[in-house]
């Protein structure tokens, strides 16, 4: 395995990491902004109000996106196995 192939695998692994994290991060961002807007509009400045809805929303998003994440990881593993078998 030469340097270009190692860089290619590393780039694919980083892109896969971004794809796996993106759904949960987007949901957390949207919920955080919505709760921040709600707090600004109602002048409720409770610091702990953000955590419970955000945790529940991220948990639900992980449950919903788990099949997609598994498929992405399975495809990456098949690609790595094919590279190993091709050596």
Image: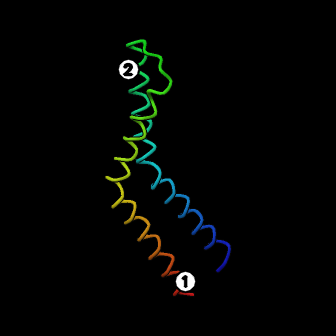
The reply, left or right, for residue 68 in relation to residue 85 is left
The reply, left or right, for residue 63 in relation to residue 83 is left
Relative to 45, say whether 72 is above or below. below
Which residue is located at x 52 percent, y 87 percent? 85
Q: Where is residue 55 in the image (x, y as percent from the top left)?
A: 42, 40
Question: Alpha carbon of mark 2 to alpha carbon of mark 1: how far?
Answer: 52 Å
Which mark is drawn over residue 76? none
Element type at marker 1? helix
- Marker count (numbered): 2
Relative to 49, say whether 76 is above or below. below
Which residue is located at x 34 percent, y 47 percent? 60
Nearest to N terminus: mark 2 or mark 1: 2
Q: Foreground: 4 or 66?
A: 66
Q: Kindly give the residue lying farthest to the right in the view shown.
A: 3
**Quadrant showing the N terminus:** bottom right
Relative to 86, say whether 37 is above or below. above
Task: Determine whether label 2 and label 1 are within 8 Å by CB.
Answer: no
Q: Nearer the viewer, mark 2 or mark 1?
A: 2
Question: Quarter of the image holding residue 57?
Answer: top left
Question: Quarter of the image holding residue 2?
Answer: bottom right
Q: Position of residue 15 (x, y in %)?
A: 51, 58
Q: Where is residue 35 in the image (x, y as percent from the top left)?
A: 40, 26
Element type at marker 2? helix
Around disc 2, counting alpha carbons within 10 Å, would you say few (fewer than 14), some (14 to 19), or many (20 or more)? few
- Residue corresponding to mark 1: 84
- Residue corresponding to mark 2: 38
**Quadrant showing the C terminus:** bottom right
Around disc 1, counting alpha carbons within 10 Å, would you say few (fewer than 14), some (14 to 19), or many (20 or more)? few
Which residue is located at x 45 percent, y 55 percent? 20
């Amino acid at each position: 395995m030469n340097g270009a192939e190692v860089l290619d695998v590393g780039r694919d692994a980083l892109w896969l990491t971004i794809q796996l994290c993106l759904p949960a991060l987007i949901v957390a961002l949207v919920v955080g902004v919505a709760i921040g807007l709600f707090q600004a509009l109602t002048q409720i400045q409770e610091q702990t109000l953000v955590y419970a809805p955000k945790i529940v929303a991220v948990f639900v998003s992980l449950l919903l996106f788990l099949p997609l994440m598994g498929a992405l990881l399975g495809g990456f593993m098949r690609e790595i196995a094919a590279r190993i078998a091709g050596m």
